[in-house]
Structures are given as structure tokens and as C-alpha cells.
Amino acid sequence: MSESGGLGPEVRTRDGALRGSLKDGVAAFLGVPYARAPVGPLRFRAPEPAEPWDGIREATAFGPTAPKRPYAPPLDALLPDPEVAGEACLNLNVWAPWPTAGGAEPRDDGGRGDLVSPARRPVMVWIHGGSLVHGSSAVPVYDGTAFARDGVVLVSVNYRLGMEGFGVLPDAPANLGLRDQIAALGWVRDNIGAFGGDPERVTVFGESAGAISIAALLASPLAEGLFRRAVVQSGAPMALPLAEARRTTEAVAARLKVPATAEAIARVDRDRLLAAQTEVTGKGSPLSGGKSFQIAVDGEVVPRDPARALADGASADVDLLMGTTTEEYRLWFVPSGVTDRVGPWVQRLLLWKAKVPSGTARVYRAGRPREKPGEVLGALATDKLLRIPLNRLADARLRTGAPGGTYLYEFGWRSPVLDLGACHALELGFVFATLGLPETRALTGPDAPGELASAMHAAWVAFASTGDPGWRGWDAARPVMTFGPGLPSLVEGPREAERLAWEV
């Protein structure tokens, strides 16, 4: 680990030397391969270790993103999703505090990638969301500078998406995207010491599909020991039986008029594959349903349903911070007009299809007399899919005496953009402290409160550093740290009548 004149900071990993960029005491190493490019015979195979290189590899630009299509309007304007061309999409980025000239400089130990230093820093590994078909580590909102500025080594990861990452095919391993994430965590274990990070203090965190991925990793024997703490943002433990998860794969193959096998799909032009994938999955949403790619219970990476495994004590020693936004549903229901189109009769029909008990729905209607039927529907969907499962997991960890800490939060500041309110993904710019970026402001507007971002970001840093985000752990009083509206405050049992309505 060194600075090389004016050429940028250099570091030696086990695969070879890297040269990054340096600004204001933060070094960034971008587009670092953690596995071989998934092309040719490796396209539908488990990730293989990256090939070592000679000389110094420049690491100053984001690496290729996984094949994907942009979000459909109007979400494309709210959720920027850059695309970087290239095949070697299994790459990651590292932001790290960097010693200033004349300061105490850690030493490389001679090529093993371990750092000889009196104090190693906590590490956070970011797994992006995007319904397993969108997103990448190149999204500007996920810039790791603020974390590095505050003493954390921040890693963000790309992984395979859609059919290539989560297709269920008889002649290919399942959950390839999850296997990619595990490979990246293995790279962190083996190399992060060279960047000043502590491989024994790794926190994995993610949002939406990234959070669902983390819940699966918590239940996976292949990920055991690769991280000490986890943050689950707006995603809950879930996976489908293999046959059920395969239905989306079959629907895409049927649209392409090819067998649902890796061999056949590999022969399809990638643009045609992405088009068919979008046609099959593009009409629904995580809350309203429709066909989608899902993590599968495959007997290896995910041996059993993650919700049951975690309730039974899997990863009980891992510190866990988890939560939601208050109005997750508004990201999908408001721009699409669902909140205005759904009347009382359609609301009842959709709740019946979703198997929501009628008594539960009555409690929500009674407690929200001024809300439209579509808004009440959205609140029920948010709680059924996110808030209630996370509460149940926290309760299970409390009941079984899990040694790992358990903390819950809720993000409630409301965006004025398109009347989105406290919608899905809104907290991301606050967690990363990137409110000043135009890509963040697309969702938050120009006047998001910086003090709330400072508080939320500091809580994530504290959790990664110590296992304590700064408020009371989960107990019988159900404490939830609420970030807005207004200043952060600890609330015991928020909307308890609605939560209890699900205990039927």
C-alpha cells in the first residue's frame, strides 16, 4: 500500500498490483476483477477465480456492468442505472482511507495481500438492488467516499443478473448471482487487508433485491464466516422452491421459442434475450406481483427457505440491522397511477388474491380513513412483504436468545418529487451521504435534510465499527429508530394495531 508520486495510490492484491485514484484522503480502486469474465463456457457456470496479471493494473474507472435493460419510464428518471460495456462484469470497487504524505503508512507484507498495521478498519460490502434484473455498483448514489472519509473500507460489487444470474436451468447451477456475491466476499476475505481493512470485521449491506440476497447469504452454508454483520434494507428473507422459481425461466424461453436450457439460451443473441426477459418481467413490481426472477431453494447455496432457516437460528451470531421505508409502495403505485385507479371493489379483489385476511384489511381501513383505497392497498402490501417478515425475524432472534445484536429502523422522511413520499429506495442517498448528487436528487428533490443523512450515515458506520448503531437493541417493547420526518427518534411499537392484525 503506497503512493507512487503523482501517479495515484498503489496496492498489491493476491492477483496483482493495482493503481487507483486519490482525492481528499480517500483512495478509490474501481473495476477490480474478483472472478473471470462469465463468457463462453463460463457463462452459465459458477464463478472462477480471477486470472493474475503482471505489472500494474489501472483501476480508475468502473468495470463492465452485468447485461441488463434500463428501467421502464417513469422509473428510469428516478433510478439512474448506468451501463458500462464489456464482458468482465464480475468486478468490484474499493474506497479506502489513505494515509497522507508523511503520515503513518501501513505496509504490504510482501505480496500475500495482508496489511501489517496496528489498527485495521471496518469493512462494508454493498450489494445493490434492482429486482435481480437492474442495477450495478456504478450507480453514482452508491459512491463510497463518505464511508471511507469516516474510517470504513467500502466495497461495492457487481453480480450477474436476470437469466444469467438467476435463471433456473437443468444444465447449469442455480443462483449464479448469489455465487458471484459469495466469490466477491471470498475476495474481500483474502485481499481487503491490503487496503487497510479488517477481514474479521466485514459488514455486508444491501437494499431491495440486494437485501433479499443478503438474507439468503445469512442462511447459506457457503457464505458462513465471510461476514460478521449484516444490514437488510427494504428486503425480507425469501426464496422459492426450485420448480416455482423456474417458471420465469420457462416463460422467457417460450417467448424465445427455445428449450429452457443453458445450452439453448446461450445460443440466443443477448439483445433478444434481454428483450424477452423484459417482456416477461417488466409488467409487474416487487409489491404488485407478476413474473420475476427469484432466489431459488437449490439445496446447495440455499439449502432451505431463508425465512425458516433464520427463524430457526441460522447466523444467530451475526449482528443484524434491518428495516424499511414507511411508504415503500409509493415508488411503484404513485407514478403508475395505481393509487388513483384502485377503488374499493378492486382493492378487495386484489387483497383476496394476495390472501390478506379480511380482518387485517379492516384494521388498516379503519386506521387510515383519509387514505385512498390504493394507498391502503399499498400499506398492506408493504407490511405483508417487508415490515411484518422483518418484525417476525427480530422476534425469533429475541425468542431464541441469538447472541448477535438485532436492531430495527424505519425511514420516514417524505420526498416531494411526484408525491413519492417515504418510498422504496429513498433512504439510499442518506445512507451513502450522497444527497448533493443530481442522481440522488432525482428521487429526493433538492432540499433533502443533510442533518438526517448525517445521522443515518453515522449509524451505519457505527454499526459496522462496533455492532451498535446507537440505539437500543430489539426487545419486548419493539424499539424502532425512525429517521424522519423530523429528527431521528426511537419509537416503541410503531403502528402496533396494524402489526397485530397480521397475527391471525
Image (cartoon, grey):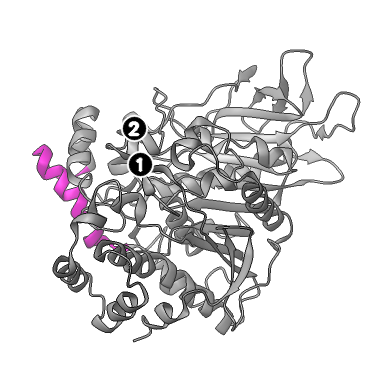
Q: Amino acid at mark 2?
A: Pro
Q: Residue furthest front?
A: 370
Residue 52, quarter of picture:
top right
Q: Secondary structure at mark 1?
A: loop
Q: Which quarter of the rendering shows the C terminus?
A: bottom left
Q: Are marks 1 and 2 in contact (CB under 8 Å)?
A: yes
Residue 280 among magenta residues: no
**Residue pointed to by mark 1:** 161
Q: Residue at x 35, y 30 (%)?
A: 39
Residue 103's x, y, as percent?
90, 30
Q: Amino acid at mark 1?
A: Leu
Q: Count residues near mark 1 (Cα–Cα under 10 Å), then give few for <14, some for 14-19, many for 20+.
A: many
**Chief secondary structure of the magenta portion:** helix
| Residue 185 rendering spot, x and y as whole percentages | 56, 47
**Residue highlighted by disc 2:** 67
Whole-percent x, y for residue 390 in the image: 47, 69
Q: Residue at x 17, y 38 (%)?
A: 276
Residue range of the region highlighted in magenta in the rendering? 240-261
Residue 472 can be seen in this image: yes
Towards the viewer: 130 or 302: 130
C-alpha separation, residue under disc 1 versus residue under disc 2: 7 Å
In the image, is residue 269 above or below residue 372? above
Residue 266 relative to residue 435: left or right: left
